[in-house]
Image (spheres, rainbow, N blue to C red):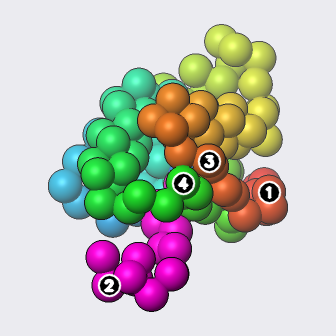
Amino acid sequence: SYAKKRGIHVMAEIDVPGHAESWGNGYPKLWPSLSCTEPLDVSSNFTFEVITGILSDMRKIFPFGLFHLGGDEVYTGCWNLTPHVKQWLDERNMTTKDAYKYFVLKAQEIAIDLNWIPVNWSAHYILP
């Protein structure tokens, strides 16, 4: 309300999948494994359920239509090193680059479904 009274729009941000490692402290199932804690687990529906919950709650707090989903500086290599994620990738004939794109687009879809206009950093992923 302070910002709104002054004509300021506040754009909230969650930076997924790469800068959300701390989320696993409360929800370890978000991590692909204990040795791969970043990026979030692309193969888990739970990951996207949590993102949906966060975006739903944030919608109540931030009236501005834009929401930043981050998406930069993602080291996707550990997805290949985590057996269940690697299996998920193989079953879908996906590379980690494909999985990164899948993650970003799925997060955007969630945001759009919740009446947000998604914003992302330009795609910067780091392959092994």
The amino acid type found where label 2 is placed reads Tyr
- Where residue 25 sits in the image (x, y, percent)? 23, 60
Q: Answer with mark 3 or mark 1, whichever residue precedes in sequence.
A: 3
The residue that disc 3 covers is 117
Using a 10 Å C-alpha cutoff, classify the residue at mark 1 as few (fewer than 14 neighbours), some (14 to 19) or many (20 or more).
Answer: some
Closer to the eye: label 2 or 3: 2
Which residue does the image show at 63% across and 49% down from the upper left? 118
Q: Is residue 98 visible?
A: yes
The residue that disc 4 covers is 65
Q: Answer with mark 2 or mark 3, whichever residue precedes in sequence.
A: 2
Compared with 17, 104 (above or below) is above
- Where residue 78 sits in the image (x, y, percent)? 59, 49
The residue that disc 1 covers is 123
Tell me how far mark 2 sits from mark 3, CA to CA: 22 Å
Q: Is residue 11 left or right of residue 124?
A: left
Tell me how far mark 4 sits from mark 2, CA to CA: 17 Å
Q: Secondary structure at mark 3?
A: strand
Q: Is residue 69 visible?
A: no
The residue that disc 2 covers is 2
* Of 92 and 23, the residue lying toward us: 23
Compared with 70, 47 (above or below) is above
Tell me how far mark 3 sits from mark 1, CA to CA: 17 Å
* Of 103 and 29, the residue lying toward us: 103
Compared with 74, 81 (above or below) is above
